[in-house]
Image (spheres, helix red, strand yellow):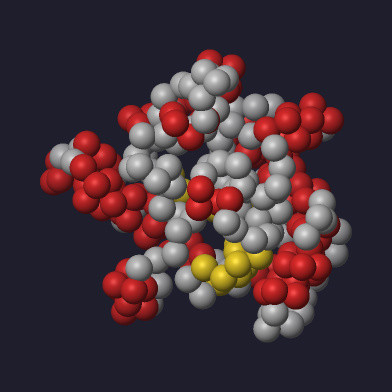
C-alpha cells in the first residue's frame, strides 16, 4: 500500500464526527490514514484484545507509527504476547519507558501505586503520561489512534470518534464496538487474545494492580490504579502539566 501525504488538518470536528457516525472501524482507520498519512500513530498496550486494532492498522494503514509504553511492571505474559504479535503481524513497535527505571523509582519513592491518590497520580505521570507525550513529540505525531471503547468507562462513554487532546487529534476507530464484536473480529481473522484473558484477566495493565474479574463484573474493576479506572493516557493534561511539557520541549 503506497504511503499517503497528509491532507488538510484544520478539521471541523462536529462535521467530521457527524460524517463518521455509524461508519465501520475500517472506514474510520482509512479516514485517519487519508488525513494524516505518516504523521499518524496508534497506541497499544498489548492488552486482552489489542490484536484487533493492530490488525486493522497493519492491514489498512501500515505506515502508522505503533507506540507501546513499557512501565517496567507489565506481566511477563504481556511481553511475550507483544513479541508474538510483533512477529506475526510484522509490526515495527516504538517502545518508550520512563526516564527513571522502576527499580530506582521504588528505591527513592517506594511503591507509589500504594500511596493513595497522589502517589497513583505521580506513578501514572512518571510511567505513562510523560513517556507517551515524549513518544508523540519525538515521532512527529499529529494524530493518535487509540482502541478505546465507549462501554469501558464513564469518561469513554462521552467521547466522539474524533477529539482534540493536548493539541493533537485523537481518533477512536472501535469506540462503538462491544466485547462480542471484538470476539467476532478475532475469530474472523484467527487472531489471539492475550494469554491471561483465559484466566479471567479481561482488562490488563501492570501486574501489581491488575486482578482477574468474573463475567458478571465490569472488566475495568480489575484495574486498581485510581477510582476513575482511567490509566491517565486518555485524559487531557492539566494546565500545570501542559506548561511543564511545553517548557521541556515536549
Vertical comparison of 42 with 107: above or below: below
For the C terminus, the quadrant is bottom left
For the N terminus, the quadrant is bottom right
From the viewer's perspective, is 114 left or right of 33?
Answer: left
Residue 167 location (% of width, % of height):
51, 75
Q: In terms of depth relative to the viewer, which is nearer, 135 or 43?
A: 43
From the viewer's perspective, is 67 left or right of 239?
Answer: right
Q: In terms of depth relative to the viewer, which is nearer, 102 or 87?
A: 102
Instruction: Write the residue at 39% across / 57% down.
Output: 129
Residue 209 visible in the picture: yes
Vertical comparison of 208 with 245: above or below: above
Instruction: Write the residue at 34% across / 74% down.
Output: 239
Vertical comparison of 47 with 199: above or below: below
Q: Quadrant of residue 206?
A: top left
Residue 9 location (% of width, % of height):
69, 80
Q: Quadrant of residue 177?
A: top right
Residue 31 location (% of width, % of height):
79, 65
Residue 95 visible in the picture: no
Q: Quadrant of residue 194?
A: top right
Instruction: Write the residue at 66% across / 65% down.
Output: 162
Residue sitting farthest toward the left: 108
Q: How many marks?
A: 0
Residue 74 location (% of width, % of height):
42, 34
Instruction: Write the residue at 26% across / 52% down.
Output: 122
Vertical comparison of 32 with 103: above or below: below
Q: In terms of depth relative to the viewer, which is nearer, 130 or 149?
A: 149
Amino acid at each position: 500500500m503506497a504511503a499517503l501525504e497528509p491532507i488538510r488538518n484544520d478539521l471541523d470536528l462536529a462535521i467530521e464526527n457527524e460524517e463518521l457516525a455509524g461508519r465501520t472501524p475500517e472506514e474510520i482507520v482509512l479516514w485517519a490514514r487519508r488525513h494524516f498519512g505518516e504523521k499518524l500513530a496508534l497506541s497499544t498496550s498489548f492488552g486482552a484484545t489489542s490484536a484487533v486494532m493492530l490488525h486493522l492498522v497493519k492491514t489498512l494503514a501500515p505506515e502508522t507509527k505503533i507506540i507501546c509504553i513499557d512501565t517496567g511492571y507489565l506481566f511477563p505474559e504481556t511481553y511475550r504476547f507483544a513479541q508474538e504479535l510483533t512477529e506475526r503481524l510484522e509490526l515495527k513497535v516504538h517502545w518508550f519507558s520512563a526516564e527513571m527505571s522502576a527499580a530506582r523509582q521504588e528505591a527513592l519513592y517506594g511503591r507509589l501505586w500504594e500511596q493513595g491518590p497522589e502517589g497513583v497520580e505521580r506513578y501514572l505521570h512518571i510511567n505513562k503520561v510523560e513517556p507517551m507525550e515524549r513518544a508523540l513529540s519525538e515521532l512527529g505525531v499529529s494524530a493518535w489512534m487509540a482502541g478505546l471503547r465507549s462501554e469501558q468507562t464513564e469518561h469513554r462513554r462521552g467521547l466522539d470518534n474524533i477529539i482534540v487532546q493536548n493539541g493533537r487529534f485523537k481518533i477512536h476507530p472501535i469506540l462503538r464496538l462491544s466485547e462480542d464484536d471484538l470476539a467476532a473480529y478475532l475469530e474472523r481473522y484467527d487472531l489471539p487474545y492475550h494469554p491471561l484473558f483465559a484466566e479471567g484477566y479481561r482488562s490488563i495493565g501492570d501486574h501489581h494492580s491488575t486482578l482477574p474479574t468474573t463475567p458478571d463484573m465490569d472488566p475495568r474493576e480489575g484495574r486498581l490504579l485510581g477510582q476513575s479506572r482511567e490509566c491517565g493516557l486518555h485524559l487531557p493534561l492539566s494546565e500545570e502539566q501542559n506548561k511543564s511539557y511545553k517548557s521541556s520541549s515536549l
